[in-house]
Amino acid sequence: MMILSKKVFFLPVIVLMLSGCFGSSTKPTLLICEELDDNEEWVEPAVLAQQKYGTPISLSLVLLELPLSDLDKKHVRPRSADWDEYRIRSERWDASPQVPADAVDFIGWFTQQSVKRNNIAWQDAGEHYLALRLGHGGYHRFEADKYPELVQQAKGVELRAQRWSNELQACKGQWQGESWFNKLKLW
């Protein structure tokens, strides 16, 4: 009787252990790919910003603070002076941060200015984030040791941009055959 109870106890344990070895081999979900599937209106403007300004797609998306929520329709929070300068220089008087194409175009223009004015490399998403938060002059005068929270936020943006850049490369195969992906020729 005791031998039977041991077998009953160990059988489920063995089954659980083996299920980990022989379980499904699906790939982990790529978060940015899913987000773009749900928000296709971001893809084309991000590609256009890359072509027009040189802004990497992952940089545009990370500075827009994706994932998006239906509650927050302001997709980019530019400083008013920067937004005004953008509208003047681009002659886009009706541009609005609530419109995805306008928000992405602003990010493309702003990051291009950051590269020119502050010598920030395209791949330094954390530095682009700081420039966006502080403005170009504020970024130039920024003292990191006085604002550790802002530096931590910039590091988080940097990590997210790197992850999203890798995920975007993996999305290529996921979206083969879908109309918008083929039209845009991301890669």
Image (cartoon, rainbow, N blue to C red):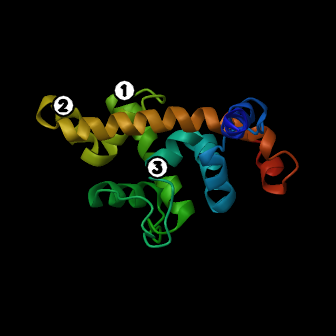
Query: According to the image, label 1 marks what residue?
Result: 119
Q: Secondary structure at mark 3?
A: helix
Question: What residue do we see at 64% from left, 43% from top?
Answer: 30
Can you say whether 26 is above or below 67 in the image?
above
Pointer 1 with pointer 2, Cβ within 8 A: no
Q: Amino acid at mark 1?
A: Asn
Can you say whether 169 is above or below 87 in the image?
above
Q: Residue furthest right?
A: 177
Q: Amino acid at mark 3?
A: Ile
Residue 140 in the image, given as x and y percentages of width and height: 22, 33
- Which corner quadrant holds the C terminus? top right
Query: According to the image, label 2 marks what residue?
Result: 144
Characterize the local packing of mark 3: few (<14), some (14-19) or many (20 or more) Cα atoms within 10 angstroms: many
User: Could you tell me if residue 54 is visible in this image?
Assistant: no
Q: Secondary structure at mark 2?
A: helix
Q: Quadrant of residue 29?
A: top right
Residue 69 in the image, given as x and y percentages of width and height: 49, 66
Q: Secondary structure at mark 1?
A: loop
Horizontal arrangement in the rendering, residue 144 relative to residue 45 (left or right): left
Horizontal arrangement in the rendering, residue 168 relative to residue 74 (left or right): right
Q: Amino acid at mark 2?
A: Ala
In this rendered view, identify the residue nearer to me: 149 or 54: 149
- Which corner quadrant holds the N terminus? top right
Question: CA gap, disc 1 to disc 3?
Answer: 16 Å
Residue 143 in the image, given as x and y percentages of width and height: 15, 31
Query: According to the image, label 3 marks what residue?
Result: 107
> Which callout, 1 or 3, points at the residue further toward the start of the chain?
3
In this rendered view, identify the residue nearer to me: 171 or 13: 13
Q: Residue furthest front?
A: 1
Question: CA gap, disc 1 to disc 2?
Answer: 17 Å
Question: What residue do we see at 27% from left, 57% from top?
Answer: 81
